[in-house]
Image: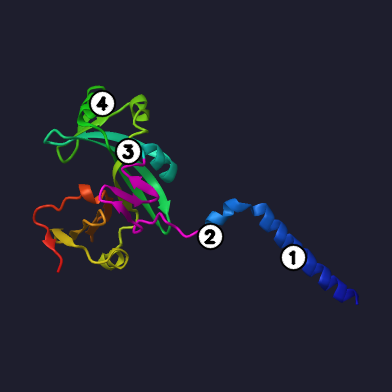
């Protein structure tokens, strides 16, 4: 009789403890079981001018929104191509979304006149290996870019062993492709605003931009 009472009491205590743990957990932990919507292959085209990926909307989301999503901003750099065109890029390191870790680069939307002013007030300027000019900005000028919209995103997985089948299963067959050399090829999905660099000897790179801004490079072949 004593043993039976003990077992019943133990079951009651266990049930109460489970209920208490569930109550103390609160609604915030429900996010842990919610399906993810921010994986690299979860791309939603909202219109030709709008693309949603990583729970961010191009070009409506801002650099501030990207920091809230990806975490600490690593750096912001201003580049000038050999043709004189400026581009402003923000870098995020050690981003973890689902099973993959990666680096993320956000290209910011800003008029060329503003970027020329940033270049004029830069701390230093150096040439890259490709012959572009790279300008280093001070913290005050970087902080002033937080409200800039995101024009494009690049996602570079830390793991370099991803092959064509990995991307084919998640994105399907590309509409176009371009062979870069013996070990790398680019895949293009213009209707989804996605391009993928697959490199057997280097890092894979996924790039996202609204379909209206997507351009197929010369020499690309159409996939049959």
Is 93 a magenta residue?
Answer: no
Q: Residue at x 8, y 56 (%)?
A: 219
User: Which percent across, then down, holds residue 33?
Assistant: 53, 60
Number of marks in picture: 4
Residues in magenta, as a range:
33-61
Say which label, 1 or 3, has the lower sequence index: 1
Is residue 203 at least partly visible in the picture?
no
Q: Can you tell which mark lies on residue 118?
A: 4
Q: Is 12 positioned to the left or the right of 213 in the image?
A: right
Name the residue that disc number 3 marks: 149
Q: Quadrant of residue 184?
A: bottom left
Name the residue that disc number 2 marks: 33
Q: Is 158 positioned to the left or the right of 219 in the image?
A: right
* Numbered disc 2: secondary structure: loop
Mark 2, Cα crowd under 10 Å, few <14 / some 14-19 / many 20+, is few
* Numbered disc 4: secondary structure: helix
Could you give the CA–CA distance between mark 3 and mark 4, rounded to whole angstroms? 17 Å
Tell me the quadrant of the picture where the C terminus can be found: bottom left
Could you give the CA–CA distance between mark 4 and mark 1, rounded to whole angstroms? 63 Å
Q: Residue at x 51, y 58 (%)?
A: 34
Is 53 a magenta residue?
Answer: yes
Name the residue that disc number 1 marks: 15
Q: Is 178 positioned to the left or the right of 202 in the image?
A: left
User: Which percent across, then down, holds residue 100?
Assistant: 39, 57
Could you give the CA–CA distance between mark 2 and mark 4, rounded to whole angstroms? 44 Å
Say which label, 4 or 1, has the lower sequence index: 1
Say which label, 2 or 3, has the lower sequence index: 2
Closer to viewer: mark 2 or mark 3: 3
Mark 1–mark 3 CB contact (< 8 Å): no
User: Which percent across, then down, holds residue 119?
Assistant: 23, 26
Q: Is residue 52 above or below residue 169?
A: above
Q: Is residue 105 above or below residue 157?
A: above
């Amino acid at each position: 009789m004593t043993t039976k009472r003990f077992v019943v009491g133990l079951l009651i205590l266990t049930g109460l403890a489970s209920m208490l743990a569930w109550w103390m957990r609160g609604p915030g932990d429900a996010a842990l079981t919610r399906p993810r919507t921010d994986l690299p292959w979860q791309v939603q085209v909202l219109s030709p001018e709008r693309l949603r990926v990583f729970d961010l909307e191009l070009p409506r989301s801002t650099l501030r929104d990207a920091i809230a999503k990806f975490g600490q901003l690593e750096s912001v750099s201003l580049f000038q191509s050999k043709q004189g065109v400026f581009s402003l890029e923000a870098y995020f390191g050690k981003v973890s979304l689902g099973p993959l870790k990666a680096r993320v680069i956000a290209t910011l939307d800003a008029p060329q006149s503003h970027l020329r002013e940033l270049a004029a007030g830069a701390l230093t300027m150096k040439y890259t290996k490709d012959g572009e000019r790279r300008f280093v900005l001070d913290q005050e000028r970087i902080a002033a870019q937080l409200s800039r919209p995101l024009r494009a995103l690049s996602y570079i997985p830390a793991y370099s062993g991803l092959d064509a089948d990995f991307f084919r299963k998640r994105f399907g067959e590309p509409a176009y492709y371009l062979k870069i050399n013996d070990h790398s090829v680019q895949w293009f999905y213009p209707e989804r605003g996605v391009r993928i660099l697959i490199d057997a000897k280097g890092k894979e790179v996924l790039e996202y931009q609204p379909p209206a801004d997507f351009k197929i490079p010369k020499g690309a072949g159409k996939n049959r």
